Amino acid sequence: MDRIDWIENETERTARWQSESGMPAPKQMAIVDDTIRPDDAYGLAGQGTALLWRGDFPSARHMLAAMAKRVDYRARKSRAKREEGTTPGQAFHLHRQAQAQKARLLGMLLVQLEDDYYIKLPRAQDVKAACTEAWGVSDGGQTVVALRELMGVIGAHEWRTKGLEVPGLGGRIHPHYGVFTPTRNEYLDLIAKATFPAAAKEKGVAFDIGTGTGVLAAMLARHAGIAKIVATDIDPRSLTCARENVARMGLADRVEVVEADLYPEGKAGLVVCNPPWLPARPSTPLEKGIYDPESHMLKGFLAGLADHLVPGGEGWLILSDLAERLGLRSEGELAENIAKAGLVVKERTQATPRHPKAADKADPLHAARAAEVVSLWKLVPAPRV
Ligand SMILES: C[S@@+](CC[C@H](N)C(=O)[O-])C[C@H]1O[C@@H](n2cnc3c(N)ncnc32)[C@H](O)[C@@H]1O
């Protein structure tokens, strides 16, 4: 367990250091409150001095927003200078660099949590349930965490409590902290409207590889009349979340959630997989649903598919072409991997994203996002010749 040490009122202090991204505990720390000006807070954070907030809690949130505004302003200015001649791939890398810098700088505004995740600051909200869900039961000691991270934990608790209406599901999915949340539903529509293979129906079996919240497994159980679905994931938070969601929907007798690297044992009439769409390294565990390093999951899914299908079975891959548009995957690479795995495309259906980012002209990746297409690739083993 990492610790953070500092001196306050001439007394040595120590607490557990919480950082989801594994950011090391800052070495320099200033004690601040509502009297610090945003420009000074921004300046200190930029120099690597963390700011432990001892003022009013809502003011800390305002300070975070004020610092974020300054980071965004500077990022916009330096982007405008570079814009001309930047390829989509360069724009993507610069965007990630800017995101990492923003995370580092905003991660300098810290708050302390007491035993039981209590915040001993004026007008502080109760974050006990949110922190317990994200980090487990408190060990009783004090914790220091970046306010930005704590806001993420609070946001995740709100999503988990109220759930997310999934149109093709006829119900709500309750995502957990750190689990991929299906907020973009164009790909869910593609599944909802697809014709299911006879091999998976009636007494058939389906696999959902990388189930996350369990949303696709639940859709298959609810609408495709598939008798048994085995849903896998390698991430412990996703496994717990998927189990809870299927139980909540009364589907636990038909959806089995198992820990596996890609495939479970056996064969199925339908295998669905929605891997992370971008081949890049996640910078925090929270990005594992977005970035697939070296396309490990995508390639593994394709390579193992033919061996896990019963005769007449189909593999359904959900993938966006954003990676091609950003130059992260070459044109033709997907087709090559499909062929290399002994598969052919039986059918491809497509949808255009409707999420707000696709229309946001200020987004540095706007050109690529505006043209993005999400596809459902129905794959079958290549006929033997
Ligand atoms: C993009 S998310 C999709 C989640 C869910 N199927 C959905 O559509 O909302 C990808 C999921 O794959 C999981 N995953 C990544 N690598 C995996 C592997 N090798 N085996 C199983 N699951 C994996 C991640 O933990 C994550 O939950």
Image: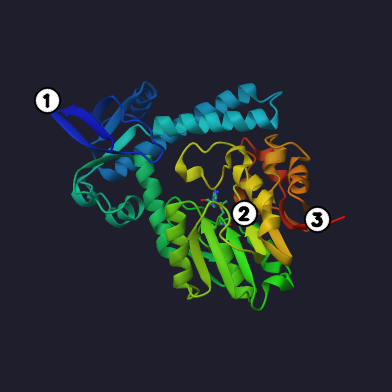
Tell me where residue 103 sits by quadrant. Answer: top left
Which amino acid type corresponds to the residue marked 1 in the rendered image?
Glu
Using the numbered discs, state the Cα–Cα distance from disc 2 to disc 1 in whole angstroms: 54 Å
Comparing 227 with 92, the one in front is 227
- Image vertical order of residue 352 relative to residue 65, above or below: below
Q: Residues within 10 Å of mark 1 (few under 14, many from 20)?
A: few
Mark 2 or mark 1, earlier in chain? 1
Tell me where residue 87 sits by quadrant. Answer: top right
Residue 182 in the image, given as x and y percentages of width and height: 55, 57
Cβ at disc 2 under 8 Å from ligand 1: yes
Residue 168 in view (yes/no): no
Which amino acid type corresponds to the residue marked 3 in the rendered image?
Ala
Write the residue at 33% across / 54% down: 130
Write the residue at 43% across / 57% down: 176
Write the residue at 22% across / 49% down: 139
- Image vertical order of residue 350 relative to residue 366, above or below: below
Residue 7 in the image, given as x and y percentages of width and height: 17, 27
Quadrant assignment for the C terminus: bottom right
In the picture, the disc for residue 382 is 3
Residue 257 in the image, given as x and y percentages of width and height: 49, 63
* Direction from residue 49 to residue 239 in the image, left or right: right
- Reading the image, the residue beneath label 1 is 10
For numbered disc 3, what is the local secondary structure?
Answer: loop
Which amino acid type corresponds to the residue marked 2 in the rendered image?
Asn
Using the numbered discs, state the Cα–Cα distance from disc 3 to disc 2 in whole angstroms: 22 Å
Tell me where residue 228 sits by quadrant. Answer: bottom right
Decide: marks 3, 1 in contact (CB < 8 A)?
Answer: no
In the picture, the disc for residue 274 is 2
